[in-house]
Amino acid sequence: MSQRTRVELLHLEKRIERWIRFGRHVEEEILDRRRRALWFEPGQVFAFVRWAANDHGTAVSRIDILRACATVEPLTTIPGVTPGGEVLLRISGWPKVERVLLAIDQVEALDLHPSDACPDHWRHVHNRITAGKVPRAYDHARHEAWLLRQRIDA
């Protein structure tokens, strides 16, 4: 069994879209015209967006921010993610998904890759949006504190 996390992406025009909003994959495989797979090393954080429509409009709109896990770690199964991952954020419904996408844009505006942000920030964003509140913005001071914490834990 591979230590890597596999994410299957799909694009069926105006019907189903599964895509990565951010993350650093280590391998990519093109399966066919509409499908491809990406692999992430354990510890990598990525955002997986799922959207589907039917004849009446949007049926599913979801974003999951996950940390790829080693095979010995506990994980949550997510459709399209094998074997699964540690859930940092799990939001559904387009208005809430849009707020998460704005939070991701805010981190990128700091010239930081969102997968390098403190995982606790994504948990915070999840909790605040779920509670109907506005999440606090990520900033350089919080990022520096995260980097220092990583050095202490190492």
Image (cartoon, rainbow, N blue to C red):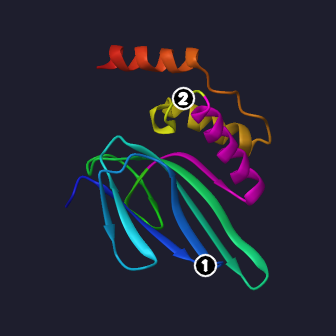
Residue drawn at (26%, 48%) of the image: 72
Mark 1: secondary structure: loop
Amino acid type, mark 1: Glu
Mark 2 or mark 1: name the one nearer the start of the chain: 1
CA separation in Å, label 2 and label 1: 32 Å
Q: What is the number of the mark on residue 111?
A: 2
Q: Are marks 2 and 1 in contact (CB under 8 Å)?
A: no
Q: What is the magenta range?
A: 86-109
Number of marks drawn: 2
Residue extending farthest to the left is 1
Residue extending farthest to the bottom is 55
- Name the image quarter holding residue 136: top right
Residue 98 spot, x, y in % from top left: 72, 51
Q: Residues within 10 Å of mark 1 (few under 14, many from 20)?
A: few
Q: What is the number of the mark on residue 75?
A: none
Residue 117 spot, x, y in % from top left: 50, 31
Residue drawn at (71%, 37%) of the image: 128
Q: Which residue is the site of mark 1?
A: 13
> Image check: 136 left or right of 145?
right
For the residue pair 22 and 153, the one nearer the viewer reads as 22
Residue 44 spot, x, y in % from top left: 37, 42
Q: Is residue 18 magenta?
A: no
Amino acid type, mark 2: Asp
Quadrant where the N terminus is found in the figure: bottom left
Residue drawn at (45%, 32%) of the image: 116
Residue 153 spot, x, y in % from top left: 33, 19
Q: Residues within 10 Å of mark 2 (few under 14, many from 20)?
A: few
Which secondary structure class fits the magenta region best? helix
Q: Is residue 98 magenta?
A: yes
Q: Taking 30 as reference, is 140 above or below it?
A: above
